[in-house]
Amino acid sequence: MSGATARAGANVALVKYWGKRDEERNLPAVGSISITLSDLLATARVGMGKEGPRFRSHGVPVSGVAADRMAHYLDWIAGRLGAGAERLCVDVEAGFPVGAGLASSAAIYCATAAASAAAVGASIDRAELSRLARVGSGSAARSVFGGWVEWHRGTREDGEDSGAEQLLPVADWPVALVVAVVHDGPKEVPSRDAMRHVSRTSPLYDGWIEAQEEDLESMRSAIAARDFGAVGRLAEENCLRMHATTFAARPPVFFWLPVTLAVMQAVRQLRADGCEAYFTIDAGPQVKVLCSPERVDRVAGALAGIPGVVRVLRSGLGSGVEILDGSVPWK
Ligand code: PMV
């Protein structure tokens, strides 16, 4: 019981998780579909100790709300794994900006859940791990699996039917993602606060919920048929519908910057010029662009040239969470 290290990739939803049916257990109001990334990675080292900070980032103690949230989660997962007497601590290292709308919490909480299970010697499967990761950060449920992933809404109150599963492994359809980072600082509104506010005040929220089942169905079919155009169009529509709920909230939540729109426009222009690429945007101003691996250089070059784009990141699809030392707690 000396500790364990796990590594997980961020994931990007093509059909978004937006709204909760249970805040405590992170049960989503809708299902979602994502791709897991190979190049935006977080590593979590979980150990036990009677003293010292519970949450460190690159060895430096984290304080405030993020630290309280992590300590609460570590106590919860220790209890769930039958190691309630253990005081778990975690040191995370993310190879990309944290809290900037790049799905860092998905990678961090997924890696933390996996390392916690390995550290306490639990024996679980990936489906169970997904449900455990979900309680840390909803989208973390999806980073457990590689490639193309669906997280089911579920209907049970205890959340035991709300976890992710793999739709397609990476090798079956390896697409690529280019991220236009347009703002370096932290997000103005954390996703969980924005979701709560929008679901309570936006008159468009009910329409969002109603349309989601059809989007999930169409996206599943488009993925099964490897229809890139259909996947991309659905991803753009679903993203715009999610953001429409935020514009209509009282007061409105506005994640975009002027450069966000400039990047969206450039993606449309790339398409008009014969380079198939599609955008999606989460709870922040960064724009994530889906394309085939052969088009990454052209897409990245076009986005890097837009005034206001700070940096361009590239990623392929990853194969899900891994234990880097110790025995793997799942089959
Ligand atoms: O898992 P959270 O609480 O960081 O929420 C993520 C919400 C979105 O990124 C906006 C959508 C999604 O499905 O990832």
Image (spheres, rainbow, N blue to C red):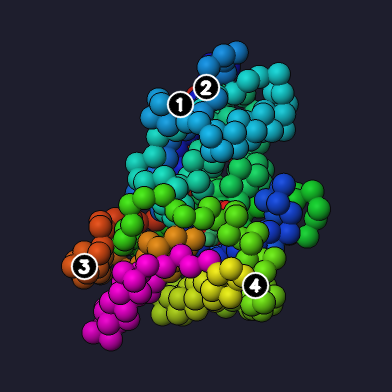
Image mark for residue 268:
none
Query: Where is 13 relative to 132, above or below?
Result: below
What's under tag 1, amino acid-wise?
A: Pro
Q: Residues within 10 Å of mark 4 (few under 14, many from 20)?
A: many
The magenta region covers 253-279
Which mark is first along the chain, 2 or 3?
2
Q: Quadrant of residue 179?
A: bottom left
Q: Are marks 3 and 2 in contact (CB under 8 Å)?
A: no
The Cα atoms of the two marked residues, 1 and 2, are separated by 6 Å
Is 129 left, or right, of 324 in this rendering? right
What's under tag 4, amino acid-wise?
A: Ser
Q: Are marks 1 and 3 in contact (CB under 8 Å)?
A: no
What's under tag 3, amino acid-wise?
A: Pro
Residue 169 visible at all: no
Image mark for residue 61:
1
The Cα atoms of the two marked residues, 4 and 2, are separated by 39 Å
Q: Is mark 1 within 8 Å of ligand 1?
A: no
Q: Residues within 10 Å of mark 1 (few under 14, many from 20)?
A: some
Q: Are marks 1 and 2 in contact (CB under 8 Å)?
A: yes
